Image (cartoon, grey):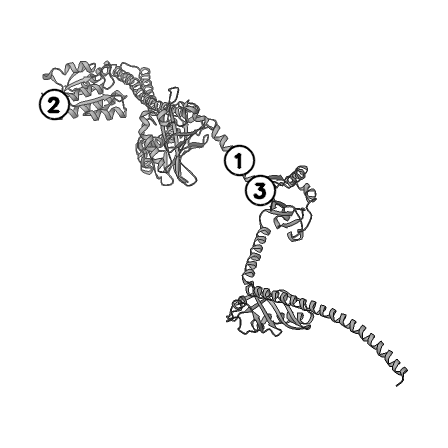
Amino acid sequence: MSKEEIDILKRALAREKASRKVAEEILELKSAELWEANQKLARAYSEVESLLSKTDSQLQGVFETIVDAYVVADINGHIIKMNEATVSLLGLKDVNDSCNLMELVQPSEYNNVYLAFNNIYKYGGSISDLLVNITTKDNRDIIVQINASVIYDNGVPIATQGIVRDITKDKEAEEYLIQSENRLSTLIRNLDSGVLLEDENRKIVLTNNKFCDLFGIPLQPDQLIGADCSNSAEESKNMFVDSKGFISRINEIVEKRELVVGDELKMVNGSILERDYIPVFSDSKYRGHLWSYRDVTLRRKYRHNIEAEREKYRSIIANMHLGLVELDKEERIIMVNQSYLNMSGYSEDELLGKVGKDILLAKADRDMVEERMYERKKGLTNAYEIRVKNKQGERRHWLVSGAPNYNFNGEIIGSIGIVYDITEIKELHLQKENLLLKLEKSNDELQEYAHIVSHDLKSPLRSIDALVQWIKEDNKDKLDDMSLSNIDHIEKTLEKMEQLISDVLEYSSVGSEDKEKTNVNLADLVDGLCQILYIPEHIKVNVVNPLPSVKGDKTKLQQLFQNLMSNAVKFIDKPEGKIEIDVKSERGFYQFSVSDNGIGIEKQYHDKIFKIFHALNKSKDSTGIGLSIVKKIVDLHEGKIWLESEPNKGTTFFFTLKK
Amino acid sequence: MKTLNVLLIEDDMIEVMKLNRATKSLQLNHKIREANNGEEALNLLQQKDNLPDIILLDLNMPKINGIEFLRILKADERLRYIPTIILTTSSNQRDLLECYKIGVSGYVLKPLKYEDYVSKIDKLLAYWSVNELITA
């Protein structure tokens, strides 16, 4: 081997030695760096590990102590892990029990649940607030709310973990709330008051049918929700009588945000509304307000009517001529009207609180009044007369009508009396009675007087007749024909005088004696008269229809027929006289007629003839009193008398007698 | 026929004459005494030994009237038995009733006609003269 070669080899070796040294140095450096890094890594790893274990234990704690049911299940729904809450929620035995969650889902919900989970397995994400009806292992139907997320292993979903919450009770409460909300809104919708709830921005939150009605809004209440009310007052102001006031008042109320109750609004159509304003505060923050409108037209009118009525009666009570007094249970005066004060003469102060009968009542009437008051306390209404002494000391007669006074519960709380001063009437009554007595007495006296006068007048007639007879007897054959004829005239005149006196007496006697009325058979009566009366041969009396019986005074009825019949006889001037007596039955009375074919009576005298001393024919046997007596008798029997007549043909007298 | 002792109580002079003349013309022998009024009559009736058989009494008289007199008469123990006949012009129903109530034996109305009067007196006296009477 050459040196050179050796040299070359020597130099190459040297270079190699140097390079290895450098490489060794670098390696050594790198190795140190690596160790350093390794150390760091080891440190980091241990940190991570401790961190992990820490977190893990933390999680374990959460897992075990979590209140809600926490469950981990594989993608088929088999439970891998669960806590105690899950056990009791799902009705399992213990945390190691096996169960497939999907078996618990009610069949109707199965599809929903499947889709929801399938969705997150495919596309990721989580399930939140999924409501599922399930049947637990121990057969309870409950509603659960599920929040769940997927667990991945290397990007592949391997399980689901989630929280299951039993919300059956919440659901029920919610439904209950909805129901009651529904009820409330139905109530509000149909409320008889118009309701408008606005929020703080004056947007409509709620209103009802009545509100739409009252304001003539042609929409459903729901359609108004959200509408702005800030201009609505302006829009509906013309519906109100005081449109300006309507707006200013609303603005004022809204601005003040204070409760307003019972504002009265008169509408142009005559209705009257009453409005309430209720501001709504929540946590002392203004949230809006509630308007409510009520149609009080009827009530107002009713009240108005009641007030008018009350006023009317108040005025009647105040002004009536009747005294009004109200007493409490102890008979103390609570209230009197002006008339009562006028009647009693006392002032209100002198009477109120006093017992009326102590002040006014005459002692003699006290027992009677106490009896009446007792009756009244038992609920009886009564009326009676009392004598009182007014403040001036005058004795007055009062007519009292009393009635118990009840409260709203129907209990007697006293009495009310109406008093009428009948002193004048009473006096008139007494006066009348006295007058009647006097009249009776003077009638009696008159009757007596008539008898005495007639006796005194008749006696001389008898004397004259006796004397004339004696003259005749004593001067037999001495008197000439003329004297005898004159004496005859004297006798006739005496007879006429006698008749006149008898008739006057009779006339004055009719109606003076009140005889009991009896049933009088007129057929018998007229039959009898035909026997007694002087009826000349040429006159025929004919009773057409059978005469009835009537109630009356027999003597007077006889006189009645007698006078009419003898009148007929008297005035018949025909060779064949005819007297017809007839009767016709009418409603409630009989109509009799006595007709003749005599001289008749001219129309102008038809009324006169019934008046005393109006004899048309002052003939020898007519005193002019007969028909007056007839009329008096008919009057006495409450009948009527009239006549129809034609001069020279005859007369018919009609009269009626009660059945 | 018995002769009657008649007491006529009558204030009218002509009436007295009428009775006297009537009995005379009838040729009756009755003894007629007159009293012009009730007082006078009562005086006459004091003589208990000379009482009349019957009394004819007018009602309308001054002082004591007929009815008052009748009452006095009927109140007397003895006089009450003397038949008293009213002779009057008064047809007053009330008087008639009252008289019978107190107690009269007859009530005769004086007729207007004298001849009727005579006839009535004839019958009246004839009737009482056939009656049995209580005598003193």
Q: Residue A362 carries which label?
A: none
Chain where mark 2 sits: B
Q: How far apart are marks 1 and 3 (CA)?
A: 16 Å
- Mark 2 to mark 1 CA distance (whole Å): 105 Å
Q: Can residue A616 be seen in this view?
A: no
- Name the amino acid, label 3: Val
Question: Tag 3: Cα neighbours inside 10 Å, few (<14), some, or many (≥20)?
Answer: some
Q: Which of A21 and A302 is in front in this view?
A: A21
Q: Residue B75 occupies which quadrant of the picture?
A: top left
- Seen as rendered, the residue at the extreme front is A3
Q: What element carries label 2?
A: loop
Q: Mark 3 lies on which chain?
A: A
Marks 1/3 in contact by CB < 8 Å: the verdict is no
Q: What residue type is labelled 2?
A: Lys
Tell me the chain of label 1. A
Say above or below: A646 vs A149: above
Q: Name the residue under label 2.
A: B2
Looking at the picture, tell me which residue is in the foreground, A273 or A488: A273
Q: Do labels 2 and 1 share a chain?
A: no
Specify the quadrant of the image occupied by residue A611. top left
Q: Where is residue B37 in the image (x, y as percent from the top left)?
A: 21, 14
Which mark is drawn over residue A307?
Answer: 1
